[in-house]
Amino acid sequence: RRACRSAHRRSRPIARDFHPIAQVFWLGKMLASSLRAKGCKGTTVARATATTTTTTGGWTPRTTTRVAGSRAGGTSAKNGAWIRTSRRGASRNQTAMSVQLSQDELKKQAAWKAVEYVKSGMRVGLGTGSTAAFAVARVGELLSNGTLTDIVCVPTSVATQQQAESLGIPLATLDEVPKLDVAIDGADEVDPALNVVKGRGGALLREKMVEMASDSFVCIVDETKLVSGLGGSKLAMPVEIVQFCWKYNLERLRSLEEVAGCEAKLRMDGDAPYVTDNSNYIVDLYFEEPIKDSYAAAKAISALEGVVDHGLFLDMVTTCIIAGSDGVIVKEK
């Protein structure tokens, strides 16, 4: 502030004799000169808006929207692996500081981007989880202000149902609306082929039913969910099983050749087994290395009596929206 006042005082005797436009130009020059002299370079505030990159028909981004003040870089995939990429055209002499968005803010922007796929008159699947919750809130907002009309939504969990009801979103079940136009949901892992692991929130069965009933599945994640192969995060790959003889089924899952080397654990909720919205248990499988053949593993797991469903969602995602520290990337399959 002292630098600004100093620059203004020094400029007044000269600038007042100029045309008003010239005065603005002169004051700008004096202010910049004063800031440089006082070591204030780089204090310009950048607009805090996420970058959006759209990728179609391959891993190389075709269209990129940059934002003043955001740093170069991003996430893409090549040769079957996610990689960091450089965004050309970024100014190397940029003096503005990059304003980094929080993870929740990025998730919100990704969720809002996903809701752009929802049009009036559609039948929509609503996902479960922290990112999907932003999408549900956005749908409710657009309904309340009249931007969206005549839509019916099918929730994938009791939690999502309660959130949607609180926002006045019209709801139905697959019994009433067996065919959906679009589903929006998160994921726990995403590989370069847009196959995903879901269900760490416990809603995998309803999620899979709703998303299989949808013409398109828009998946929202943050960049920490990107893996070279499913199971690669070393976190849980869930399998929903009936409560009856759960130990028997846990051991059979552990013994499957297609998931050899995995660790199988019954998911707990405090001192008691975790119970899904469908009154089932979940066995979580943990892998030290990515699953060698996700399709073979999915087939083998599904073949076991007592298994209700698993968290491998293969060939289901049509669009993936990835929120990262550098902005939002849209990957179309």
Image (cartoon, rainbow, N blue to C red):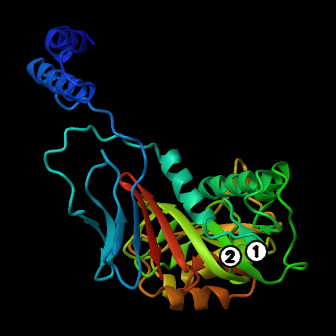
Camera-side residue of 308 and 327: 327
Looking at the image, which residue is at 71% across and 58% down? 139
Residue ID at (50%, 82%) = 259
293 or 304: nearer the viewer:
293
- Label 1 SS: loop
x, y (%) of residue 173? 86, 73
The residue pinned by badge 1 equals: 122
Count the marks: 2
Specify whether residue 236 is in view. Answer: no
Above or below 84: residue 51? above
In space, the residues marked 1 and 2 are separated at their CA atoms by 8 Å
Q: Find out whether the residues at labels 1 and 2 contact each other: C-beta distance under 8 Å.
A: yes
Query: In the shown orientation, is residue 59 left or right of residue 268?
Result: left
Q: Secondary structure at mark 2?
A: strand
Amino acid type of the residue that numbered disc 1 sits on in the rendered structure: Met
- Which corner quadrant holds the N terminus? top left
Mark 1 or mark 2: whose residue is earlier in sequence: 1
Q: Nearer the viewer, residue 61 or 68?
A: 68
Q: Position of residue 25 (x, y in %)?
A: 20, 29
Query: Which residue occupies 28% across, 83% down?
Result: 79
Query: Residue 125 location, x and y as percent?
Result: 73, 71
Question: Looking at this view, is 81 or 267 the one in front?
Answer: 81
Q: On the picture, is 8 further left or further right than 157? A: left
Can you identify the residue that label 2 sits on? 182
